[in-house]
Image: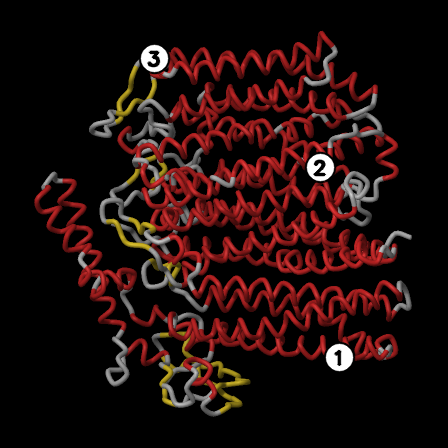
Amino acid sequence: MFENLSHLALQHYWWVLVSILAALFVFLTFVQGGQTLLYSVGKTEGEKTIILNTLGRKWEFTFTTLVTFGGAFFASFPLFYSTSFGGAYWVWLAILAAFVIQAVAYEYRKKPANFLGAKTFEIFLVLNGLLGTILIGTAVGTFFNGAMFSLNDMNQVDWQTPYRGLEAVLTFHNVALGLAVFFLARVLGALYFIFTVEHETIVARSKKQLLYNTIPFLVFFLYFLIWLLLKEGFAVNPESGEVFMEKYKYLHNVLQMPLNSVILLVGIAGVLWGIISTLFMNSGKGFWFAGTGTVFTVFALFLLAGFNNTAFYPSVYDLQSSLTIQNASSSKFTLTAMSYVSLMIPFVLAYIVYFWRVMNRKKITEEEMQEESHVY
Amino acid sequence: MIEIADVSLVDWSRAQFALTAMYHWIFVPLTLGITIIIAFMETLYVKTGKEEWKKITKFWMTLFGINFAIGVATGIILEFEFGTNWSNYSWFVGDIFGAPLAIEGILAFFMESTFIAIMFFGWNKVSKKTHLLATWLTAIGANLSALWILVANGWMQKPVGMTFNPETARNEMNNFWEVLFSQTAVDKWLHATSSGFVLAAVFVIGISAWYLLKKREVLLAKKSILVAAVFGLISSVYLIMTGDNSTRTIANDQPMKFAALEGLYNGSEGAGLVAVGLFSTSETDPNNENLKDFSMKLEIPNFLSYMAFLDWNAFVPGIHDLIDGNEKYGYMPASEKIERGRVAIQKLGEFKEAKKAGNTQLANTLKTELTSESFQNNYFKYFGYGYFENPQDLVPNVPLTFYSFHTMVGLGFFFVLLFVLSIIYIVKGTFDKKRWFMRLAVISIPLAYVASQSGWIVAELGRQPWVVQDLMPTMAAVTRISAGSVQTTFWLFAVLFTVLLIAELKIMFRQIKIGPKH
């Protein structure tokens, strides 16, 4: 079945899959956002315990999605993997370090003889939430603003600044996306607490945080979006593969891919409805609206970056080194083989959703924390 | 063309990868094995309904949780380091190597992370049977993730199922099943996972023995020992069998590694196996510090020939045969391979030049030549050799490979004995009366880790200077970055991992001291 698709169709298919993984990852950063709310929502030890156990049962999903995102990108667009990871060395290693400290923090925080003290592990979680979201958001910003690299005829990357990717923070548009992701993660984190925790004070504080974080999220996100639609973009000539600058490229993408634009609008509306219904209508389901909205929005943004003859990882140093879904992809054979593997994804999603529901059937309470044998 | 990076960059990049891999491998083998032991214990709980089995299950689960967290932490770095530190490699083989990593995420990691949450937090949320299923699926997920990463590693040791595409300057997959079911990959998976089972069994027996020495948790300890020893014995026999298979695969596909792990310099028919050996400190060859003579050795005649080729009189090539060549037995001198590799590299360069200059006709002619079967078999096969100046650089560190191999094998046999005695003593009811044996069981825990790490030293150091056997030398695989940057991240990770390891050990020791919750 996949054998009959053209190489180009498979490249598009895999860009869709990578975009879905990215979208799910951003949704799952509610864990990271929630971690940064630790001290503003949890004041007593008991409250902190509830918060960290609420998040602690989900952190591995976010982590696994990130790892799978990396693996899927490697398999489908290896030139991106080698160029970006090898090139923007410092950015990626900083992101990874932020995730290393998260992985141990939940398990070790409350354990006796933990050597560093509970406070240190809490700081690890806050740092993970802060750096993980801002840095990843900023790094993805370079999909639209370009990075400083060149490729030689053997496709080896040469990075043109000694900061190895950290220079992305000098472009405010990148940082705006990083901050938008950060505040969105906090919004989602607050919504998740409201959705899963049965504890008046935690819910009340989460609502307050929801409001406080929605405002900066909207400011940064709208700035990012509007500027994106107004800026020049990195277009590809589908015949020659030549990359050139096109005015209003992303606006053109929005207009030329109407279905994607509908997904984007539905996504944004979903996020807003999730927030509004929670703040003003006392709905407890806002998390799902905002979560689904996040998935739609991020997915649509990724398609804007890679579809419609656009270079998804442009180089501002050497335009012709820019990566497109065509020049960065795996061979037709590999994409075909991997496409068969991708048929397992719905099955994997189904069991995740099923068991997620089973585990979340009852809200988390103070009593459960006392009865539970494995508490973070 | 691919440029060779400076030595210190290559060394620091290798050091960083070795650091991450070795730290990661402290935690992975225990996860592979103990999840299965826990699943057995929980099965006994569900079958018998006895609360004591639930308590035992939960106790080992606590220790597993502590170990698992840090395993995950070190694992994420490892996956991304292929890109950050070995980006030239990532492109050259990404078309093949990326696939197993992606499958690992999709099929194994999600399984592990979904069911581990149920395993730890689902006791009161799902039925007994669903919980048991979750525990088993966690164990299966862990072992499946090992499968995919070892398929990737196996491919680097023996690249199969691909062709070189001059257009993209990389290897491209043409047979997925060949990659997945390559003998090297299968051997690697079976050997590495069963080594994890053995390590976990030693871990459980050792800690239980400590309780018995302290006259505590007697019931938990005895029951745990029985489960672990039986599991350990079966696994260790299997471990030896898979190890034996691996040796033959290595002898065929990586003769230099084979010669190094046996310290064999001069090949011979009916070669003997050096069971125990000690290298002298002086170098035998001024050009190569890795070549040293044995100052003492204990040899079993003809055994090496049998081990390698199942023939007591077969010829086993030594390092000198592989470097200088041996016409009688058909081994090409390394200098000839280097020459042929250079031809392949040069041809590829000419093709690239022709493409750049827009000379389509010449480019097409060169492409046809490059992809022809005779060029592939006579020249391209030696592509990687073209990067070397000195044939001596093709020799790995012999003493280190030899000692690691012998440590691993020796300890492997020792564990069989440990399990057999454990079963005998526990069945006879004398385990807790033999203080020497209980002490030995406790000391065996670090030995299991030593054996496990030694195995990877053999696998990875023994295949140097290759990152992909015969195709890509390690020095050509590295990311072009300043050695200083890698040095900085090396130390940052060294400090971070060490601090986390100390935390892990302190927490682990304390939890063992606390014991199961009553």
In this view, the residue in front, B324 or A343, is A343
Figure check: B426 above or below A343: below
- Measured in 3D between alpha carbons, the distance from the residue under mark 2 to the one under mark 3, in whole angstroms, is 43 Å
- In which quadrant of the rendered view does residue B410 lie? bottom right
| Cβ–Cβ under 8 Å for marks 2 and 3 | no
Q: Residue B281, image x and y in percent? A: 49, 81
Q: Residue B441, image x and y in percent? A: 76, 73
Of the numbered discs 2 and 3, the one sitting upstream in the chain is 2
For mark 2, does the 10 Å Cα neighbourhood hold few (<14), some (14 to 19), or many (20 or more) residues?
Answer: many
Labelled disc at residue A248: 3
For mark 3, does the 10 Å Cα neighbourhood hold few (<14), some (14 to 19), or many (20 or more) residues?
Answer: some
Identify the amino acid type marked 3: Tyr
Disc 1 secondary structure class: helix
Figure check: B465 above or below A291: below
Q: Residue B306, image x and y in percent? A: 45, 85
Labelled disc at residue A154: none
Residue A323 seen anywhere in this rendered image of the structure: no
Residue topped by disc 2: A57
Q: In this view, does A359 lie to the left or right of A167?
A: right
Disc 3 secondary structure class: loop
In this view, the residue farthest toward the top is: A280
- Measured in 3D between alpha carbons, the distance from the residue under mark 3 to the one under mark 1, in whole angstroms, is 76 Å
For mark 1, does the 10 Å Cα neighbourhood hold few (<14), some (14 to 19), or many (20 or more) residues?
Answer: some
Identify the amino acid type marked 2: Arg
Residue A24 seen anywhere in this rendered image of the structure: yes
Disc 2 secondary structure class: loop
Look at 86% across and 30% down and name the residue there: A366
Look at 32% across and 42% down and name the residue there: A332
Which chain is home to disc 2?
A
Look at 48% across and 44% down and name the residue there: B102
Residue topped by disc 1: B421
